[in-house]
Image (cartoon, rainbow, N blue to C red):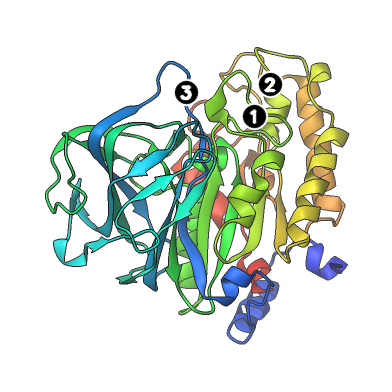
């Protein structure tokens, strides 16, 4: 798939934005994913990772009520559950989806039982996902859904998204999947087993935000949906009535492009290892925004390492080229995001001058190589003009690495919406 300089160059300016957004009204979103042709798109998603050692969550005949926030709406809904990192079968005794009313409680009029191959339960083999059967459900955009899963017997959360920045709920013993008022035994800040929520939305497509903790939303306000992909989804809703692009967040805290996390499994498998699961398996995927590499540079392995022991800019560029090639092989547009500043970070050994040189070299390549379909300059959006290796103070969450809510909003505003018109 060849792309011209005009397609790949950094896009900005009011004139270009106006022209491209005007074109959205008549431009079909026509990438070749067969799932998109059937009208399904991801409205929410998270990236599963391995469980934390010695802190594995165990559920015993309990119900999970997992709260998620939609990006686009649709006329039907289905969910994707994952036991892809499990070593034993995962039994789902019952599953429901509903609109969340407040806290752990749902609107009972909106509650729908889910089935799996026509059965009200599922047994998911180790290493496998499962899709529920579609149900008729007018899912609103920008709404809170509650996905309730009864786990009979004992289930260990070996496949989970560890840092949700969203409160979900665990019941006292019993099946409360359909309960309007939920008997909360405890709260959790993770999403065990739930990997995606899809809606039927003819003509829609999906943007996958693929990255690390900055995409995942570290240090943003819990339960407020202030991650930059959330704010991007809100922008897309307001850009033009009927603009149909869901946003699925596949960020994982601590994640890397090149290397699996032997020292801390919840950091997630390397992007090169999880690409098929977290991108290609996403319903209706048409675009990927790739923001990854700062952990490869700052934390290449166990403990603090000098830059000489981490990857070079050339190593990272080779990895980016693999992601680009694999996306294009499936007709998916790939948008490269520059790595954001990290000087002064509170994490010991994470920043050094040689590591900063690697970041600068990588960003120069992202901006100038013309290999991505477009460039999103998050570095420019967040850096301090007087000290470009540092975050601007008003965007700093306090650890000098992760943006705060205002920084996340600035990132979302830095995304030129016209890049999604093709």
Residue contact between numbered discs 1 and 3, judged by CB atoms under 8 Å: no
Q: How many marks?
A: 3
The x, y position of residue 339, in whole percent, is 69, 40
Indicate the secondary structure of the residue bearing disc 3.
loop
The answer to whether the residue labelled 3 contacts the one labelled 2, judged by CB atoms less than 8 Å apart, is: no
The N terminus: image quadrant: bottom right
Depth check: give the residue in front, 87 or 211. Answer: 87
* Quadrant of the image occupied by residue 311: top right
With respect to residue 378, does 370 lie above or below?
A: below
Gap in Å between the C-alphas at discs 3 and 2? Answer: 25 Å
Farthest bottom residue?
26
Compared across the picture, whether 295 is left or right of 373 comes to left
Residue at x-position 47% and y-position 23%: 52
Residue under pointer 3: 52
Provide residue 268's location: percent of width, then percent of height: 58, 33
Mark 3 or 2: the one toward you: 3
Residue at the spot of label 1: 342
How crowded pointer 1 is (Cα within 10 Å; few <14, some 14-19, many 20+) is rated as: many
Report the Cα–Cα distance between label 2 and label 1.
7 Å
| Residue under pointer 2 | 351
Q: Can the viewer see residue 325? A: yes
| Pointer 1 or 3: first along the chain | 3
């Amino acid at each position: 798939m060849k792309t011209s300089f005009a397609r790949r160059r950094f896009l900005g300016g009011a004139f270009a934005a106006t022209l491209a957004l005007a074109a959205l009204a008549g431009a079909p979103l026509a990438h070749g994913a067969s799932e998109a042709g059937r009208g399904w798109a991801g409205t929410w998603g998270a990236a599963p990772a391995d469980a934390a050692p010695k802190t594995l969550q165990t559920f015993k005949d309990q119900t999970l009520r997992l709260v998620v926030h939609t990006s686009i709406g649709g006329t039907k809904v289905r969910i994707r559950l994952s036991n892809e990192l499990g070593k034993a079968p995962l039994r789902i005794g019952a599953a429901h989806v509903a609109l969340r009313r407040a806290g752990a409680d749902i609107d009972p009029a909106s509650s729908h039982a889910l089935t799996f191959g026509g059965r009200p339960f599922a047994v998911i083999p180790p290493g496998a996902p499962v899709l529920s059967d579609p149900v008729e459900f007018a899912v609103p955009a920008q709404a809170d859904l509650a996905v309730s899963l009864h786990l009979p017997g004992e289930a260990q959360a070996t496949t989970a998204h560890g840092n949700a920045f969203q409160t979900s709920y665990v019941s006292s013993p019993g099946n409360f999947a359909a309960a309007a008022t939920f008997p909360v035994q405890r709260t959790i800040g993770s999403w065990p087993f739930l990997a995606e929520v899809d809606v039927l939305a003819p003509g829609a497509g999906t943007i996958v935000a693929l990255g690390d903790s900055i995409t995942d939303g570290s240090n943003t306000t819990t339960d407020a949906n202030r991650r930059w992909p959330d704010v991007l989804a809100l922008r897309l809703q307001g850009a033009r009535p009927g603009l149909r692009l869901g946003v699925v967040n596949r960020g994982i805290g601590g994640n890397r492009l090149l290397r699996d996390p032997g020292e801390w499994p919840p950091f997630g498998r390397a992007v090169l290892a999880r690409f098929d699961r977290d991108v290609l398996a996403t319903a209706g995927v048409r675009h990927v925004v790739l923001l990854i590499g700062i952990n490869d540079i700052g934390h290449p392995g166990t403990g603090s390492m000098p830059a000489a022991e981490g990857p070079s800019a050339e190593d990272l560029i080779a990895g980016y080229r693999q992601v680009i090639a694999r996306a294009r092989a499936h007709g998916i547009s790939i948008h490269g995001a520059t790595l954001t500043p990290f000087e002064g970070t509170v994490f010991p050994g994470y920043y050094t001058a040689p590591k900063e040189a690697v970041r600068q070299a990588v960003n120069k390549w992202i901006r100038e190589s013309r290999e991505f379909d477009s460039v999103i300059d998050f570095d420019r959006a967040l850096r301090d003009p007087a000290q470009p290796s540092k975050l601007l103070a008003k965007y700093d969450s306090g650890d000098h690495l992760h943006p705060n809510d205002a920084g996340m909003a600035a990132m979302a505003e830095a995304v030129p919406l016209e890049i999604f018109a093709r």
